[in-house]
Image (tube, helix red, strand yellow):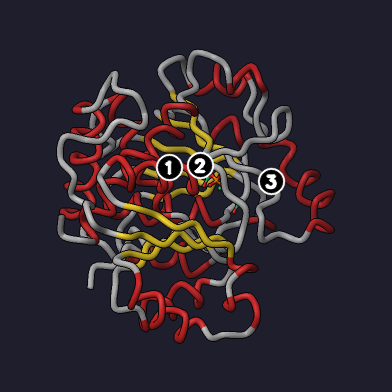
């Protein structure tokens, strides 16, 4: 069973093949209406369940459109509306859904839900974000970087802010795609020790830097994310803002990074908080390419899962 649960549990060769296929599929349908089918219809006759236990714009729409472009059909399910939200076990849900659909994508809270779904499903399961990781996002980010700047191998990626789920997947990707990664944020919001230890053991060129100005020196890519993630308590908002204010990505910081450095953000962004509008809408920003590339990268991920 080819589940897509994490970047570090998928081989570098498979990840590379998915990035290249996503890019080729994007190029092949350039200029067509969004609803036009791809020439190839690898998902014809296939049904895909998209389960959301948290809100989503990009993940929901990009998976739905991607399946349809490849000839398949989707059903978008809210965890709360399913029996899943009312006490049915994940294992039983996985077994039942596997009788109806060919592929399951799930966005959930605890990583253990994703793991249990994958363990008991007899169809592939894709991680659409958990409290700990967001691998589909990083596939789109690698695709986006390479479209603009060529191979990411050996490049300097600098993360600004909270050591959260999206950062964890960047750390996994640094290992698999062989780029250098700097975490720039306050010690109180460092990434989990487990992720850092795994990266260090794998020989990833990973640096922790508290000073944002030093952090962006020689950056090829600067990345930011929200200061309060969906899994964070709203009561932590003020504390987080106070800790993270010094790490806002603004014009001065992007200037210090150098004019060739790109800016990315998985979105949704909070303008004038983790990043200024001037950076989001400025010449170094590729945030909307990045959002679009969720579609192309995930189409390749789904094809890989289904051997199509
Ligand atoms: N970046 C991302 O996953 O966006 P959504 O929460 O809108 O899906
Ligand atoms: N870190 C953010 C990412 C949203 C796509 C969150 O988990 O809310």
Is the N terminus in the top left, top right, bottom left or bottom right quadrant?
bottom left
Q: What label sits on residue 58 in the rendered view? A: 2
* Residue 88: x %, y % from top left: 57, 85
Q: In front: 206, or 175?
A: 175
**Helix, strand or loop status at disc 2:** helix
* Residue 24: x %, y % from top left: 18, 33
Which quadrant does ligand 1 occupy?
Answer: top right
**Badge 2 residue CB within 8 Å of ligand 1:** yes
**Helix, strand or loop status at disc 3:** loop
**Badge 1 residue CB within 8 Å of ligand 1:** yes
Q: Check the image and report above or below for 149 versus 302.
A: above
Rendered residue at 65%/80% (across/down): 86
User: Is residue 146 found left or right of 76 in the rendered image?
Assistant: left
Callout 1: 10 Å neighbours few (<14), some, many (20+)?
A: many
Name the residue tied to disc 1. 62
Mark earlier in primary sequence (3, 2): 2
* Residue 168: x %, y % from top left: 47, 56
Mark earlier in primary sequence (1, 3): 1
Name the residue tied to disc 3. 227
Quarter location, residue 277: top right
Q: CA distance from mark 2 to mark 1?
A: 6 Å
């Amino acid at each position: 069973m080819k589940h897509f649960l994490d970047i570090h549990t998928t081989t570098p060769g498979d990840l590379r093949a998915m990035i290249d296929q996503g890019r080729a599929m994007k190029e092949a349908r350039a200029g067509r209406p969004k609803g036009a089918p791809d020439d190839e219809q690898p998902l014809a006759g296939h049904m895909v369940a998209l389960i959301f236990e948290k809100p989503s714009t990009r993940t929901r729409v990009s998976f739905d459109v991607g399946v349809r472009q490849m000839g398949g059909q989707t059903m978008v399910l809210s965890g709360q509306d399913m029996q899943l939200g009312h006490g049915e076990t994940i294992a039983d849900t996985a077994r039942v859904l596997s009788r109806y659909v060919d592929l399951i994508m799930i966005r959930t809270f605890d990583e253990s839900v994703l793991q249990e779904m994958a363990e008991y499903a007899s169809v592939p399961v894709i991680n659409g974000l958990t409290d700990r990781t967001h691998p589909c996002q990083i596939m789109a980010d690698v695709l986006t970087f390479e479209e603009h700047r060529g191979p990411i191998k050996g490049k300097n990626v600098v993360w600004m802010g909270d050591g959260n789920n999206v950062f964890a997947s960047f750390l996994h990707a640094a290992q698999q795609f062989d780029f250098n990664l700097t975490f720039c944020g306050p010690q109180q919001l460092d990434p989990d020790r487990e992720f850092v230890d795994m990266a260090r053991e794998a020989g990833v060129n990973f640096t922790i830097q508290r000073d944002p100005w030093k952090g962006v020196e020689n950056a090829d890519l600067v990345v930011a994310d929200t200061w309060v993630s969906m899994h964070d308590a709203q009561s932590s908002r003020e504390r987080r803002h106070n800790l993270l204010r010094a790490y806002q990505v603004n014009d001065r910081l992007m200037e210090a990074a150098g004019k060739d450095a790109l800016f990315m953000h998985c979105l949704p962004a909070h303008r004038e908080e983790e990043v200024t509008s001037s950076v989001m809408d400025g010449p170094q920003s590729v945030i909307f390419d990045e959002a679009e590339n969720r579609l192309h990268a995930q189409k390749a991920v789904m094809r890989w899962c289904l051997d199509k």
